[in-house]
Image: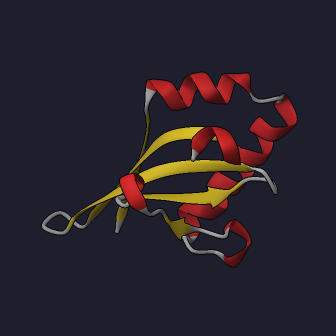
Amino acid sequence: MKKIIQRTGRFDKSFEKLNIKTQKLFIKKLELFIDDEYSPSLKTHKLKGKRKNEFAFSITDDIRAIYEKLTRKEKEILVFTFLDIGGHNKVY
């Protein structure tokens, strides 16, 4: 199945505010995410409430990446749109 990764402007702005070490760690985790969205080390989980159509995975103990997932079955494509990244209190 083909996977497409997209980012929102909000994600880009939040990413730029992270320190370089955390940015590099996100890129490393993103490579793992592309291979296996539910790798145990990512702690991927579906969100609830007003964000019930979104998912998150852990970058550090506090930093989370928030994304939406769209499946286009007719073309066998998964589209991941990253919405935000930051500390637990900021993104939830």
Asked whether the viewer can see residue 87, the reply is no
Q: Is residue 31 above or below residue 92?
A: below
Picture coordinates of residue 40 (x, y %)?
Answer: 69, 77
- Residue drawn at x 59%, y 68% is 44
Q: Is residue 91 above or below residue 47?
A: above
- Residue drawn at x 53%, y 32% is 11
Q: Please state if 75 lies on the left or on the right of 30 as rendered.
A: left
Q: Is residue 72 above or below residue 9?
A: below
Q: Is residue 48 above or below residue 13?
A: below
Asked whether the viewer can see residue 9, the reply is yes
Q: Residue furthest right?
A: 21
Picture coordinates of residue 18 (x, y %)?
Answer: 76, 29
Viewer-proximal residue, 83 or 88?
A: 88
Q: How many marks?
A: 0
- Residue drawn at x 63%, y 53% is 30
For the N terminus, the quadrant is bottom left
Viewer-proximal residue, 3 or 89?
A: 89
- Residue drawn at x 18%, y 69% is 73
Q: Residue furthest left?
A: 74
Q: Please state if 11 lies on the left or on the right of 24 as rendered.
A: left
Q: Which image quadrant is residue 32 in?
A: bottom right
Q: Please state if 5 lies on the left or on the right of 63 as rendered.
A: left
Picture coordinates of residue 53 (x, y %)?
Answer: 34, 59
Picture coordinates of residue 4 (x, y %)?
Answer: 38, 50
